[in-house]
Amino acid sequence: MPKKGPLSKVKSPTPPTAWVRVPEESEVREDVKALFDKFREKTGFVPNVARNFALMPEHFLRWFRYYDYLMRNEEPGLLSRKEREMIAVVVSAANHCEYCLASHSAYLREITGDPVLPDVLAANFRRAHLSPREEALLEFAYQITTDSASMSAADIEMLRAIGLSDEAIFEAAQVAAMFNFTNRIANALGWVPNEIYYHLHRHKE
């Protein structure tokens, strides 16, 4: 029986980032490659969500256009970037979505400069030091996630009472719904976050 060589010479395969096929970059459409290039230019890497979603390129591009506008628009009177990312973290924690929790915790650390807040929100958002508006938004997003069928007009009135416009409330519902949608795809298909997300923006400058 031949002897096995030293373990140091055994090359481990790259761990898969999904349970379904993930296309090689050489296989994807030019418009998807162009988006990959934009990710690299901005962050230095291509998020695994993009690589995984590229299996369905038209679905990916349509989803990304909606996601990108929803999370990054700066229309006055709507939600702040911080509020949207807080909703993303709380919803993703409630759904036990490793991918979105890792990535959006990193984005929230970047936006706020606070390395602790995302971890507290993920563990128990009711223990975080929040403004009344933030508390109300996160309760609203959590209820959408865990028991939307029990919601009533009173939940909307609660948000109006603290000064949110109907448009801002509509946006909050969309952000929560977007992450419930994406969390379920990620969980169902075994999407693995880029390891770098766990390290990004952990320390204050």
Image (cartoon, rainbow, N blue to C red):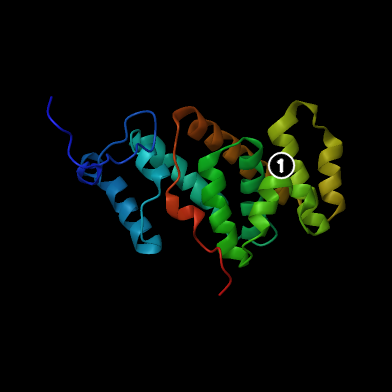
Name the residue rendered at 87%, 51% in the picture: 161
Instruction: Give SS at disc 1.
Output: helix
Is 139 or 178 nearer to us in this picture?
A: 139
Name the residue rendered at 75%, 26% in the picture: 149
Q: In which quadrant will I find the C terminus?
A: bottom right
Q: Give the left or right position of residue 99, taking residue 163 as reference.
A: left
Q: Position of residue 137 (x, y in %)?
A: 75, 49
Residue 176 figure quarter: top right
Is 94 or 39 nearer to us in this picture?
A: 94
Is 197 or 21 nearer to us in this picture?
A: 197
Name the residue rendered at 36%, 56% in the picture: 45
Q: Residues within 10 Å of mark 1 (few under 14, many from 20)?
A: many
Can residue 166 be seen in the rendering of this structure?
no
Q: Residue furthest left?
A: 2
Q: Position of residue 106 (x, y in %)?
A: 54, 56
Q: Is residue 164 above or below residue 185?
A: below
Q: Position of residue 186 (x, y in %)?
A: 49, 35
Residue 22 figure quarter: top left
Q: Is residue 54 above or below residue 127?
A: above
Residue 73 figure quarter: bottom right
Can residue 195 be seen in the rendering of this structure?
yes
Q: Residue furthest bottom?
A: 205
The amino acid sitting under disc 1 is Ala
